[in-house]
Image: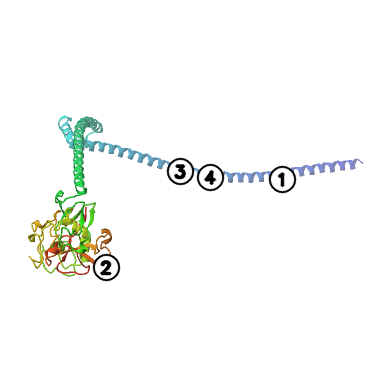
Amino acid sequence: MASSDSQSTADQLYTLLADSYSAQRAHALALDAVEQIHAKDLLAAKAEQKIAYNNAQTERAKSDQIAESHYGAANEAAEKHLNERLAKAKGQRQSIINALQQARDRSQLNYWMTEELPSLDGRTFDQLPSEALLNLKAQADRRVREITQISMELVLIRERHRNRIIGISIGIGILIIIALIIIAVLINSIQRTNSNATTTQITENKQWTTRTQSFNGVPMVLAPSGCFMLGSDATKDVHALPNEQPLTRICFLLPFWIDQFPVWQAQFKQFKGQATHASVFTGDKRPVESITWFEARTYCEQQRGARLPTEAEYEYAARGPDNLIYPWGNTFVAVNVVYSKNSNQTADVGAGIRDSGASWVGAVDLSGNIWEWTNSIYKPYPYVISEATADNIINGSYVVLRGGSFFDIDTNVRSAFRFIDYAINEYGSFGFRCVHSY
């Protein structure tokens, strides 16, 4: 009984010992496990510490690099700024030197620079210290301001004189304008007087005084406005013909210019007139002849800017309001005309030749020398002048010629005598003259 209790106690002790050993061993294993975990954590911590250290070194290197870069940039900027300030200072100094040198050369500062300026002791401007240059520049500026003030005063004085001169000029200009206005009024009055003289109806030949004017070197005489009887009065002219009757009263409300002489050969050449045939009787002062109506019209219109006269205009210029039988009067005078009894060819025309045969308006050879084309188609009297113009004639139309020629007798050189021929014909006794509107 006692031995079994002892065995039981021994087993219990053994069990306790075993459990104690197991506990110790478990504790040792736990300690080993803890040591291993701690070792691993230590290694991991050391690895992380190394990585952190390396990262810190890298960041420090970068920081050092950036800092060095910033330092270099700042240093470069500072150096650049310093150089700019130095350059600016040098530029300002040079500007002052240049200004002083220019001032020395200016005549307005010449006396001051040579007489009043303190001595430079043989030094040039660029050898002076900056403070001395600034003082010198300030003195020069004051001198320039003084001179500028004086110049402005001179300008004001000159301006006052100029204004005074302008005032005088304006006054003179006003006087000139007033004088011109007075002259213009006088001229206008004279022109109106002349206009009234030419537009007033002339009732007698003696009321008119010859007026001559040159048109491009060709003398023309003015036929004033007035009335006359176209045709012949059989009670006064024993040679009156049927085609010159009945008498028709024709009035010209406006004056007109008519050539003083028939167109002469030198004039025709000068104005580049064109004719199919040359004149039979040649000579610079002889009248143009052997010319058709078409060629005569072209010359007057295109070369002279004029036209051929109507037969009414021609007869009015020859007779006037007095209705003379001949341009010079009612009696035939042989020396006043070139006709068949004193010539067998054309004669020279021009100033001083047969002046005694001139008409009341001053036109010469309106009778004799050559027949002259008109701008009128032949129609029996009476007719409306405007309806008988030859503007649109054809080759077969009859056109009126006036004046008579060297080939005709005295009755054919009467102012009312009418001759007709085809416009296309040309003979050695056919010529013309031009008229121009007033």
For the residue marked with disc 3, what is the amino acid?
A: Ile
Specify the quadrant that holds the N terminus: top right
* Residue drawn where x is 55% and y is 44% of the image: 52
Say which element carries label 4.
helix
For the residue marked with disc 4, what is the amino acid?
A: Asn
Q: Residues within 10 Å of mark 1 (few under 14, many from 20)?
A: few
Q: Which residue is mark 3?
A: 66
Q: Residue 66 versus residue 301: which sits nearer the camera? A: 301
Numbered mark located on residue 55 in the image: 4
- Image coords of residue 151 (percent x, y): 20, 32
Badge 1 vs badge 4, beta-carbon distance below 8 Å: no
For the residue marked with disc 2, what is the amino acid?
A: Ile
Mark 4 or 3: in front is: 3
- Image coords of residue 172 (percent x, y): 18, 35
Mark 4 or 2: in front is: 2
Q: Which residue is mark 1?
A: 29
Q: Which residue is mark 2?
A: 394
Question: Which badge, 1 or 3, comes first in the chain's sequence?
Answer: 1
